[in-house]
Amino acid sequence: METPTDRIDMKVAARRQLTPEIEEFTLVPSTDMELPKFTPGSHITVETPSGAMRRYSLVNDGTAPTEYVIAVKREAESRGGSSSMHEDAVEGSSLSIEAPLNEFELVDGEKYLLIAGGIGITPIYSMAKYLTKIGKPFEVIYCTRSEEGTAYLEDVRNFGNATIHHDQGDPDDAYDFWDRLEKPGREHIYCCGPAGLMEEIKALTGHWSDERVHFEDFNPIQVVRDNDVAFNVTLADTGQTIEVPADRTILEALRDAGIETVSSCESGTCGTCKCTLVSGDVDHRDMVLMDEEKADHIMICVSRAKSGDLTIDL
């Protein structure tokens, strides 16, 4: 297994409820140190109180940060990350994080169209504040279910160039993007939100230049699927066998059993949790392994047994 990346010890300095389901967390260093700078669109990976690693966009100014501010939605089908943040990351709690990374970088352009759905507002909000600061023209289209569930509602309204749409959960009342996207323009489009929104924008911008359309997606892989079944994983070095339930990943099952593991993205995209596959038929679901590696390696954050059981070496 690969060595984990360097961590920064932080503590929760403040919490603020943005909506009934979304909490804002202000994190400060546990020791006297200078935090790494970051640019709009950046995220940090947080080791949540449950041990799950989750990525959250930074919403504050990264020019000379003394704190990192994130907003976390409590997911209805939380796998332990968001629920543990809401329940256990109280003021004063210690959290370990990885330094900021940006895979959703703002490119230099004349103007911008920023599209957000739900909690996808976090990187978009950061970008809008930055563009306001440097005087670049932009528009925001922000789609949510209801006003009550809209994080940073007044802040977005105050940009003065924002369209906010609530569909009340009615697909027939969804925002119609076609009029805005029918004719390719000179702006750069940045989109973050639920899979359905991003798929719609990808479809509607098929005639745009790929260089002008940008997406942020922290969960590109469906980790657990409806037809998954339970199986066993045996650890080669100890001989211990762990049951992996149908609704849990290998990584989660090991963590639940008190077995120490290392991970980062937990979405099959970073490679941190790569382990040696000793035996077994694997359903590889990651986006990291080369074809020639799949016979003797496995990403335990997303992949599982295709049939039978597995033996791995941590």
Image (cartoon, rainbow, N blue to C red):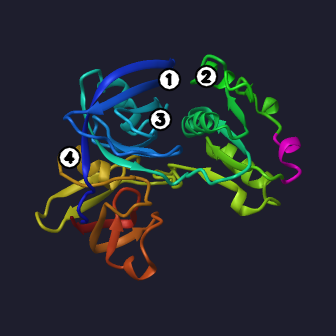
Disc 4 vs disc 1: Cβ atoms closer than 8 Å?
no
Q: Earlier in the sequence, mark 4 or mark 1?
A: 1
Q: Is residue 151 left or right of residue 62?
A: right
Q: Residue furthest front?
A: 134
Give x and y (percent) for residue 157: 68, 22
Give x and y (percent) for residue 218: 50, 49
The type of residue carrying mark 4 is Ala
- The residues colored magenta run 177-184
Q: Is residue 33 above or below residue 163?
A: below
The type of residue carrying mark 3 is Asp
Q: Earlier in the sequence, mark 4 or mark 2?
A: 2
Q: Earlier in the sequence, mark 3 or mark 4?
A: 3
Give x and y (percent) for residue 30: 21, 33
- Identify residue for label 4: 257
The Cα–Cα distance between marks 1 and 2, rounded to whole angstroms, is: 18 Å
The type of residue carrying mark 2 is Asp
What residue is rendered at 53% in x and 54% in y?
220
Magenta region includes residue 287: no
- Identify residue for label 3: 61
The Cα–Cα distance between marks 3 and 4, rounded to whole angstroms, is: 39 Å
Q: Is residue 155 left or right of residue 98?
A: right
Q: Earlier in the sequence, mark 3 or mark 1?
A: 1
